[in-house]
Image (cartoon, helix red, strand yellow):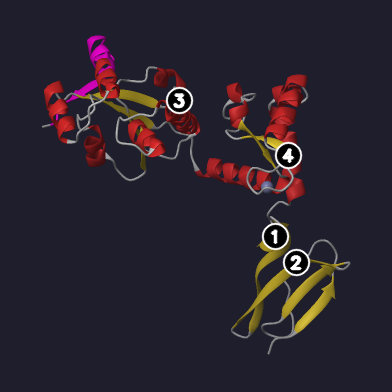
Amino acid sequence: MTVSKTVHAGSSPAKPVHVGQPSERVAVFVGQRLIDRWRLADISREVFVMAIQKLVVVNGRPTLVDYSEPSRQERDRNYSSDRRQNRPEYTRFYSSSIWRKTRAQVLLRDNGECQHCGMPATMVDHIVPSADDWTDRLDPDNLQALCDSCHHIKTDREERAKQREVQRAMTVTVVCGYPGSGRASYVQQHEAEHDIIIDKYALMQSLSGRGKYDVDADIDDYAELAYELLLRKVKVDTRYNRVWIILAGPDTRLDSLLVSHNVEHILIDTDKSTCMDRLSKLDIDSDVVTELMRQVDVAKATNQFDKFIKIK
Ligand SMILES: [Zn+2]
């Protein structure tokens, strides 16, 4: 039999209790507000408190969480005081007129709407947190309007990810070569669990909806932007064992951009005539291919590769 009983309690209910009946449910009210629920279980006719939880509002929905979870207000306080104590430049930055101006522009650009849920925005967020990338803190591309709820969800997720991961460098393997040299097949054969692959020309192809290397000059800018954003994400990421980046010629900026990781450039050194044969079978013949081949030739002539790989 289940009995419901309401007790009025003070602010600290974190004491195990024995109550009369097995499976009895106790709801705790402070004033008229339900704040806690004790889940009770019947083990060998004894009643134990299994877990003390509290009811809080998460993202507009009532949710049961562990009693020890800090409340939103507590988290807010920790977040702000942490910033003030550890990074005095934060305080200066967030009260500067350039930040206030940028913030107003971003809110205007985003129509005052949260970019995650569409509700009225209350703040401007750094997409890549400013703690991870201080140099991008005024870049409008790295800023978005958010509401408080969505910002909390994002910050929580970022903090959990940080706690989970021990900071470590990833290996970034940049796989270069002529179009048709077999770069993608090489990566597919060598990729392992916890790897990620970024194929710049496959990205361009999927954005343009055209054939491979049949680049649409208008879409090209968008594809470059998408590639840049992926690199920016890789820059602050640590969760993969290896990041494979498939290019034609090497991207010399990667060494400095991804300086916290171990970057290596390898060349899939298939000879040009073999590549041309493969491409002509696929009916691929464009100025883009010619240009990419030229870039690879320049890089070979100037020793820009760490490793050469011959595949048959
Ligand atoms: Zn929102």
Q: SS at mark 1?
A: loop
Q: Which mark is residue 36?
A: 2
Residue 76: percent from the left, percent from the top? 74, 43
Question: Which of the 4 image quadrants contains residue 218?
Answer: top left
Q: Earlier in the sequence, mark 1 or mark 2?
A: 2
Mark 3 vs mark 4: which is more N-terminal? 4
Distance, label 2 to label 3, CA atoms, is 45 Å
Residue pointed to by mark 3: 260
Q: Determine which residue is flagged by label 1.
A: 67
Measure the alpha-carbon separation of dots 3 and 4: 36 Å
Front position in the image: 146 or 266: 146
Q: Is residue 84 magenta?
A: no
Residue of label 4 = 112
Give the number of the mark in front: 1 or 4. 4
For numbered disc 4, what is the local secondary structure?
A: loop
Give the Cα separation between the discs numbered 1 and 3. Answer: 38 Å
User: As shown in the figure, which amino acid type bears the numbered disc 2?
Assistant: Asp
Span of residues in magenta: 295-311
Q: Quadrant of the N terminus?
A: bottom right
Instruction: Give whichever of discs 2 and 3 has the lower sequence position.
Output: 2
Alpha carbon distance from label 1 to label 4: 35 Å
Q: Residue at x 57, y 27 (%)?
A: 133
